[in-house]
Amino acid sequence: MTIQELLTKFNISQRAARVYVVMLKTDQVRIRDIVQELGEARQLIYEAMAELEGKGLVVRIPISKHRYSYQASSPEVLVEIAMQRVNETQSMLPKLLEIYNSNQKKGSVSIYTGKMSIRAYWKGFVIKKMNRNTPQLTLGAMEQWYGVGGKTAEVLPRLKFKKSITTKILATDGEFAQWLSRQPNYETRILENTSLTGEITIYGDIVHFINYTKGNINMTVIESEVISKTMKEMFYMLWEGSKTKDTI
């Protein structure tokens, strides 16, 4: 996936994506510079610039009363946008379930409550369902998962290693995230300054939503190609904008 293709996943038009990529290569630019670079009409570039400003990806800098230059914001803004989408998706989960349950072609929806139930599910899932051909994608507050999983959280990486299963993890930083980054077949990247408190794990067409609230730990498991595809897109948006663990 090219940078421009990735940007369109954030509801950015193709023209605005091209403008942003050009701007990342320079310090400050004026509209005429972008017009010359891309060979597009001035009005179209103004519209693309306004779109980028609206998403916080561009800053307008006054030169004189009616003249401006423009500067690209850090790509880290994209991470903030993607995190907002993840949080919105989690808040929409009850509505998604309502729509999903009305579909006569649905697969399955299961709910697990409590530490022991969730631990038992994951151990069985790794042993019976996972294989080397499908990577696991996990986004979440891994320290909280360790609190739920206990020793099971440490056993799962070893079980997955025996089955040659690769795992990509986007996590808030902490001791358990650091430990995971050292495990075979694990690639861990760190999300900084995020308010994510739950966890989302995608494996094939199965999506797991784990919610941690005081005195109430539950996991909703949805098997849906549509929901899985949406969550994978969100995951890789964040993945592209995050830092690898060894750079922290």
Image: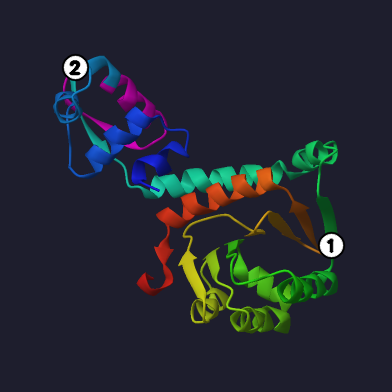
Q: Is residue 69 above or below residue 196?
A: above
Instruction: Compare residues 123 and 72 and report the one nearer the observer.
Output: 123
Type of amino acid at the residue the image marks with label 2: His
Left or right of residue 77, residue 21 in this image:
left
Q: Is residue 248 above or below residue 231?
A: below
Find the distance from the CA under tag 2 to the CA under tag 1.
60 Å
The residue at 60%/63% (across/down) is: 138
- Secondary structure beneath dot 1 equals strand
Type of amino acid at the residue the image marks with label 1: Tyr
Asked if residue 171 shows in the view, the reply is: no
Label 1 crowd bin: few (<14), some (14–19), many (20+), radius 10 Å: some
Residue 218 drawn at (x, y percent): 80, 61
Instruction: Compare residues 39 and 77 and report the one nearer the observer.
Output: 39
The residue at 74%/73% (across/down) is: 148
Q: Mark 2 points at which residue?
A: 66
Q: Mark 1 points at which residue?
A: 112
For the C terminus, give its image quadrant: bottom left
* Front label number (2 vs 1): 1
In the figure, residue 3 lies in which quadrant? top left
- Secondary structure beneath dot 2 equals loop
Mark with earlier residue (2, 1): 2
Residue 168 drawn at (x, y percent): 53, 66
The residue at 22%/21% (across/down) is: 40
Asked if residue 54 lies in the magenta stretch, the reply is yes
Residue range in magenta is 45-65
Q: Is residue 82 above or below residue 191?
A: above
Residue 107 drawn at (x, y percent): 81, 49
In the figure, residue 219 lies in which quadrant? bottom right
